[in-house]
Amino acid sequence: MILVPEISGVGQKPNYTEYNRHPYLFKFVSDIIKSPDNILSFGCSIGEECRAIREIYYPDTKINIHGLDVRESNIEYAKKNTNKNLNIQFYNYKTFIPIEYDIIFAMNCLCHYKLGIDRWIKTVDNILDMVKKDGIFVFHNTTYDITKTKLKDRIDIVTIPESYNYLIDLKCTYKKTDVLRKVK
Ligand SMILES: C[S@@+](CC[C@H](N)C(=O)[O-])C[C@H]1O[C@@H](n2cnc3c(N)ncnc32)[C@H](O)[C@@H]1O
């Protein structure tokens, strides 16, 4: 399986990230999958997302947390500035070897995408290939609606109960398709 990397200057540029940016999604997912083997933050930027996932939601360092980003400077920064005791592995496309993940977070990274829908679908298809069957794909803030593409047969929507609404940050717009289960 070959991941579709970003083409410099064509795809998404903004680098903004935030520690524990989406507690609404993190908390729900960590409640439904309590003991995953492997978690990937796709488009992890400088590592804040991985750090929050470890420190707040999955503190057991036997759970593998990987971060992948197309921008090598982000990965260099993340490696240098993340406490080694957290046991988080960061990769760029030169070092990343795809494995199967119980959970993949792809948040705020396949939005503002100027490559067109075909390349976007190919990228998302590649990401889905890495999610274990019945694993969770958290796909937040995206250019296109995955449920309106040919990838819809690969996923089921997982509905987040209203009891989690207290965690919604009004800066963020959540869609009912943010949390998906991979079915094939
Ligand atoms: C706005 S930041 C979001 C970071 C984090 N996921 C968050 O939600 O805070 C988007 C990141 O996705 C990365 N990115 C964009 N397209 C990518 C691709 N095809 N593969 C890997 N990383 C990508 C960018 O380099 C950038 O660091």
Image (cartoon, rainbow, N blue to C red):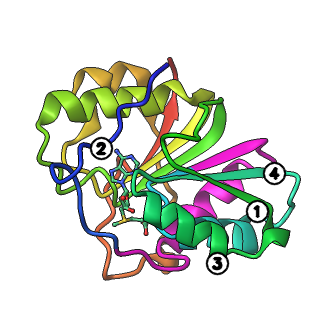
Q: Nearer the viewer, mark 4 or mark 3?
A: 3
Q: Earlier in the sequence, mark 4 or mark 3?
A: 4
Report the front residue among 148 and 43.
43
Structural distance between the alpha carbons of marks 2 and 4: 28 Å
Circles 1 and 4 in contact, beta carbons < 8 Å: yes
Q: Amino acid at mark 4?
A: Ile
**What residue is shown with label 2?**
6
Amino acid type of the residue that numbered disc 2 sits on in the rendered structure: Glu
Q: Which residue is mark 1?
A: 58
Position above or below: 119 against 103: above
The Cα–Cα distance between marks 3 and 2, rounded to whole angstroms, is 24 Å
For label 3, the SS is helix
Identify the residue under disc 4: 63
Q: Quadrant of ligand 1?
A: bottom left
Q: Which mark is drawn over residue 81? A: 3
- Left or right: residue 109 compared with residue 102: left
Q: Earlier in the sequence, mark 1 or mark 4?
A: 1
Mark 4 surroundings: few (<14), some (14-19) or many (≥20) residues within 10 A: some
Residue 173 seen in render: yes
Q: Is residue 176 left or right of residue 23?
A: left
Q: At 65% from the left edge and 29% from the top edge, which residue is drawn?
A: 100
Earlier residue among tags 1 and 2: 2
Query: Which stretch appears magenta?
Result: 16-40
Q: Amino acid at mark 3?
A: Asn
In percent of width and height, residue 90 lies at 62, 55
